[in-house]
Image (cartoon, coloured by chain):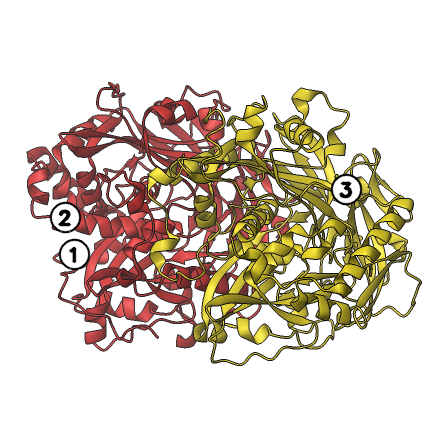
Chain colours: A red, B yellow
Amino acid sequence: MSAEADRSPGDGLLTTDAPVGATGPARAGLLPRALAGPLDEARGWMHTHAEQVPLDGLDGWAVDARTGCLRHRSGRFFAVEGLRVRRPGHPVPAWDQPIINQPETGILGLLLRRVDGEPQVLVQLKAEPGNCNGIQLSPTVQATRSNYQGVHGGSRVPYVEYFTAEAREQHHVLCDVRQSEQGAWFLRKRNRNIAVEVDPSVPVPVHDGFVWLPLRELLSLLAVDDLVNMDTRSVLACLPRELGHTGEASEGDLPPATSLHSTRSLLSWIVDVRESTEPQVERVALAELDGWRQGAWDLAHESGRFFRVIGVRVRAAGREVSQWSQPMIAPAHTGLVAFLVTRIDDVPHVLLHCRTEPGFVDTAELAPTVQCAPETYEVLPAELRPRYLDLVLDALSGDRSPVRFDAVLSEEGGRFHHARTRHVVLDAGQLAEGGGEVSEGPEHRWVSVHQISALLRHSHYVNMQARSLLVCLRAMDAMSAVDAMDAMSAVDAMDAVDAVDAVDAVAVREADGTRDDAAARPSAAPALAPALAPAATGAPGGPA
Amino acid sequence: MSAEADRSPGDGLLTTDAPVGATGPARAGLLPRALAGPLDEARGWMHTHAEQVPLDGLDGWAVDARTGCLRHRSGRFFAVEGLRVRRPGHPVPAWDQPIINQPETGILGLLLRRVDGEPQVLVQLKAEPGNCNGIQLSPTVQATRSNYQGVHGGSRVPYVEYFTAEAREQHHVLCDVRQSEQGAWFLRKRNRNIAVEVDPSVPVPVHDGFVWLPLRELLSLLAVDDLVNMDTRSVLACLPRELGHTGEASEGDLPPATSLHSTRSLLSWIVDVRESTEPQVERVALAELDGWRQGAWDLAHESGRFFRVIGVRVRAAGREVSQWSQPMIAPAHTGLVAFLVTRIDDVPHVLLHCRTEPGFVDTAELAPTVQCAPETYEVLPAELRPRYLDLVLDALSGDRSPVRFDAVLSEEGGRFHHARTRHVVLDAGQLAEGGGEVSEGPEHRWVSVHQISALLRHSHYVNMQARSLLVCLRAMDAMSAVDAMDAMSAVDAMDAVDAVDAVDAVAVREADGTRDDAAARPSAAPALAPALAPAATGAPGGPA
């Protein structure tokens, strides 16, 4: 949260306090009672209004004369810089783009406790200016260093005291690892993903806007559009697979029989891709970016594709700072990320793409099978389109029988404006039965879910989008548990009313021309199908 | 090897073809017969002469007008750039320095085979221009990408075909990981460390200047000064601990009982240090470096400390290219790296320093207990001197009873001129018995040797100097094996003559004022004491 007091109130051209979960009307009924009440209450005192303002009139921000980048006059927060990328041999061998440079690392901290042996997590209801629907579920602590050190004059970040070095000696650290964020939009961004389990004997005060939720319920809520925010998904992905198991032995690699490729071979493959795809990256002034047009209101690509850099003036209630201005990245399209999954020798595997992005610290990371904005590639011939993209799109627009998960989730609302990504999990076995060709390639390998979890103990291996889909897989597991529904409180009458409101809200936004892929989904189609039955699918054609 | 044809022959002001192992006369007797013959022969046809020339007269090199860095006019090879470092809270909170930027990754490839079950490695006899003694033992392949892709017009790099993606499918990859190099001298440098075991049925031709050596003999040769080069040490460190064991299970983490700290806790500590020490690094023109003086012959710090950037004109025989010019880094002093080691619950542990260096890709890596050039700190008060430095220096100048290993080894001779580092391993238990205080600190932790090996499967964890000392530990193990001496061929009369010559060579260089720390060591002191006896030492005071 870059923050700057802004005395012009400004009416919200882009209002961001629509109801939570509104975009997933068919699934609003999943909202548990423990959350529905606090959410409803929070809407009364917490909101953000983000009004688009001209980029050159952004209070406190200016293009630096020496470097040509857009930065805050204090030198803090972040900057929008220009990047020139060269990738010889790639279908797009060279391009220019703006990118966010935010050198300081933030904390994404999740507090856990056990009640009767069941893990619960403390989520924060948070309205970020870029959210398409107001409040989403954030980790307990989601703060940049400036933030929790009070640089912008705000009040102290609640619960940050549970994540200090001293506190970590007292409690049980479940994970603590710096992970990348979108390498196409962020230059070398890392956030510290940390989860701490407090001893049951330690009383934890619950501040306004915070809710303890059973972990399993939180996971189930991944099926609701735009509800569990990106930072929560990131840290959830880093939790050890077996929360109950604290022994070191479970954290290491499994015997080779359980994964198609040995971990040694996987690591060697990642090195290979990094070696062969390493881009040359050079910073240039924003004004020098080839193909980008600087207008009064935005910095946009001449084609209208990719994204725009816009400026917003924010008025907020229920946050440390009540007014500020900042640039944001506004994607041109809803993104699509897809996992092709299968069981190999009864072990769940995901077909991962070792993907190079210009903002990664170490060249390439494991990404979803497909990760793109499909509209960007509409005009390209098939051979230049991302591998498996058409297979995924065909499945989504066809009989949908291979679709195991389908929800639209939001990207981080502090930097990205209405950035939404459709998350899809597909059964590769069924795709193959339907005639789809699913095989490994130079940059795609079957990786077991166990291996992904082991790699997540380290930085630089699993990108944000893959982490997000990994949590969707866990949501499928949580939902397929026999007692999942019993564990979740039933929806009451008030929620049902919300669900009706939500349908109306979608209709309104469609009339506005606002993109909504969720609304385009057949409403009868389940967002969440039962997890892959162990015996139902085989290896889809096997590795290449 | 940056390479540029250079038609001026030039007499070597700095001659680099002194005999191998000459600086360790007391230990020249360790040279195995399998190596002594080929070495002697190679000296007849392989040499480099590096003559210092003015920096502004370096053929093919110039200061770039736009960036202010010294680079090759082709844009290839590497550049010497200026770096401005800010580390608030550090004893030295800000400094400027030149640094080598070499964006392309090289390969350090080691070929292994088994003869009667015993692993052998194919080493290359190689004379680098920066070597203080001519030929050293290099990995089978040691090449930048330009190198093995023939950018400089040289001939094809031998054996590179064993390390291609196709070859790696055929043979057994023992390790394959990109590792950092000196973060104080290299900006984000990575080399691919890869070892491949060829099937015994595959005949491997032995070209001139290559020698198959038993792995155990090669390890033993770490005790000989300036013989096993840095790149060989780097890739040896990345070999799995148990070469005979190819199962995945052995590669994961060990149960918690075997290490003082759990791996989870270690990783969390590394993240913590990275968060709290992350420097701000900015590139500036060489001419703008505060505290550095650009002379005709070098770029040097005003204090005379640290290092100089010099230019050399090289004439070479037995290499792909016979003449070229290049800049090099010439350190002002011999470095010192030390491991404090002990056994905790009978498991060997090393006291590692999580050390921040401005050139690291990810902020901080695990480094030796002590890593510095002691002379740099001579004028500083005790509280500003590196932790444990005085303890190590006292032990080295005292009765030496805690000293378990002591040899001077060379840094990479392609970029560094006469860069030598004294490698020392000390028994922490004996230091503690002698009254030394050995405890953990904010940036020091006891890490088991098993944990170091596990971390070495990944990038960004273990720095070059720690890898080098880890190989010294393995050398101690190899030497302490009961049959170590039997496995090694006895030295013959010719070698004894070499040893006498070597003593003379040292004397000559001392008369020249050339630094030689090896000569300063008491000649009676063993470079290599038996490895730590399991029961001899306990935890030295335990972790703080």
Q: Residues within 10 Å of mark 2 (few under 14, many from 20)?
A: many
Chain containing mark 1:
A
Q: Mark 2 and 3 residues: CB-CB less than 8 Å, in contact?
A: no
Question: In the picture, residue A355 is in which quadrant?
Answer: bottom left
Q: Which mark is residue A479?
A: 2
User: Which residue carries the number 1 mark?
Assistant: A531
Q: Which mark is residue A426?
A: none
Q: Residues within 10 Å of mark 1 (few under 14, many from 20)?
A: some
Image quarter of the N terminus of chain B = bottom right
Residue type, numbered disc 1: Ala
Q: Which mark is residue B517?
A: 3
Question: In the picture, residue B319 is in which quadrant?
Answer: bottom right
Q: Same subunit under labels 3 and 1?
A: no
Q: Please give left or right for residue B459 compared with residue B337 in the image.
A: left
Q: Secondary structure at mark 1?
A: loop
Residue at mark 1 to residue at mark 2: CA–CA distance: 8 Å
Nearer to the camera, B66 or A348: A348
**Quick check: B93 above or below A71?**
above
Residue A511 appears in the figure = no
**Quick check: B57 above or below B279?**
below
**Quick check: B140 above or below B376?**
below
Of the two numbered discs 1 and 2 on the same chain, state the one appearing first in sequence: 2
